[in-house]
Image: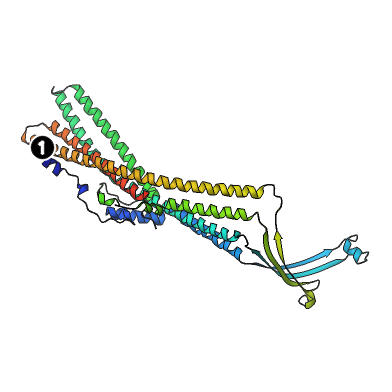
Amino acid sequence: SNERESQQRGKPKCEEYKISINTNEWWQNFNDPKLNQLVKLALKNNLNYKISLKNIAIAKTYITENTSDFFPQINLNYNLSRTAFSNNGAVANQQNSGQGKIFNLNQLDATVSYEIDVWHQVANSVNQAKSDAQSSAANSRVIQLSLISAVVNTYFQINALGADINSTKEELSLAKDNLKLLNSNYRGGLVDIGSVDDAKTQLESIQSNLSSLEKQKQTMINTLAYLIGEYPENFNLKIKNTLTAPISASLIPQSLPSQILTNRPDIEEAFYQILSYGYFEKQSLANFFPAFSLTGTYGYASSALKNFISKGSLLWDFGLNMIQPLFDYQKRASQHQRAKLQYEAAVLNYKDVVLNSFKEVDTALVSYQKDQASFIASERQLWATKEKLDLAYAQYKSGFNDYATYLNYRINFLQAKYNSINQKLAVLSDIVQVYKTLGLGVN
């Protein structure tokens, strides 16, 4: 009965939370204003994300460029030239002149050319540009989702490392007290030198661990500064040294259909790559057929400016042109073969991305379940060591235990607390990974 009561008191708090989940801005589920601020700063200032947005704008310019081929190209030309013909040339002979003749020519004309899109080559180029723009937008969302996940994970790591450092500092202080007490007991003949050496080794190990934790924390702070577009020396946001984010099974989206994975930006990107290469293959196929174009010219040409704009100076022409390449030494065939292979590779890449997405989701859910169980066990162990510590403290105050025994229980409690913090961090990382693998949090 006492054991069951003890287990009930030691029930981890993570099972007591009930949270209304937000699957869009999912980082807000952790109820941390500082975290929300950091995500907002990252989306505003991160350079990689800004570059991805510029790439969308760049891709859209190709849509406008290719769409222009639907319309005739109109050019205005003016030419002023002075020409001397050869004495022995055909012109001189035709004019029965022994002297070469010099001509001035002023010519102003407008030309119109229009390629008839018989084989839908222009239409396919526009559709390819649109697909590329959609692919760029999806790639931007991939970067956005990775950025948000990195900010959240880094923030939690800094919280956890801060809490670990505080616990380790307290543990270091206790280890120093323990060593001091053992030295005193050794001088009094109460313990042997082996106990003192063990205490020294324990103290050095704790000092080494503390140094490593402080190094890791500074590295994570620098990483967070980079993610939000700040120089490390200018990063002055105060981040708490406790990991207080709630943990609950309700944080994990329940009963979601597998179709939700189609919202993953990497799957969208792979899909639009298929469309892009498909349209490119159609364009390469059209190269095997003749190209038809309409051309026309209207203007004036005269050797003198005084009668430049006159009926006698008028010139015009119009016609239909057809070009059919006959021999290109496998150039068009190679282009079409390459386009076909690129399309097939894009299809295989899409299948791989979809397969990988299912793998990532399953892995994230399994990791969450296992780490959640480990966290619950660590919480129960923490509660058990806390009860033992309370009992040891009461016995020390009553004179039943010495101070060294109490210190050992205190160190055991801090180590259990350290393990619990790291297990909680693992669970939070798993939750973030679940959101990421489901493609949630991007629009």
Which amino acid lies under the numbered mark 1 shown in the image of this protein?
A: Leu
* Image quarter (top left, top right, bottom left or bottom right) of the C terminus: bottom left
* Label 1 sits on residue: 391
Total tally of numbered discs in the picture? 1
Q: Residue visible at 19% across and 22% down?
A: 193
Q: Can residue 42 be seen in this view?
A: yes
Q: Residues within 10 Å of mark 1 (few under 14, many from 20)?
A: some
Q: Where is residue 382 in the image (x, y as percent from the top left)?
A: 19, 39
Q: Is mark 1 on a helix, strand or loop?
A: helix
User: Would residue 106 appear left or right of 144 to someone viewing this image?
Assistant: right
Q: Which of 384 and 173 is in front in this view?
A: 384
Is 50 left or right of 293, judged from the image as shown? left
Image point (73%, 70%), residue name: 108
- Image quarter where the N terminus lies is top left
Rendering coords of residue 379 (x, y %): 20, 41
Rendered position, 438 above or below 401: below
Please tell me in which quadrant of the rendered image residue 163 appears: top left
- Among the 4 quarters of the image, the one containing residue 109: bottom right
Relative to 332, is 435 on the left or the right?
A: left
- Outermost residue toward the left in this view: 398
Color encoding of the figure: rainbow
Taking depth in this image into account, of 336 and 150 the one nearest to the observer is: 336
Q: Give the answer, above or below, for where 343 lies relative to 373.
A: below
Q: Quadrant of residue 199?
A: top left
Picture coordinates of residue 290, whole percent (x, y):
67, 58
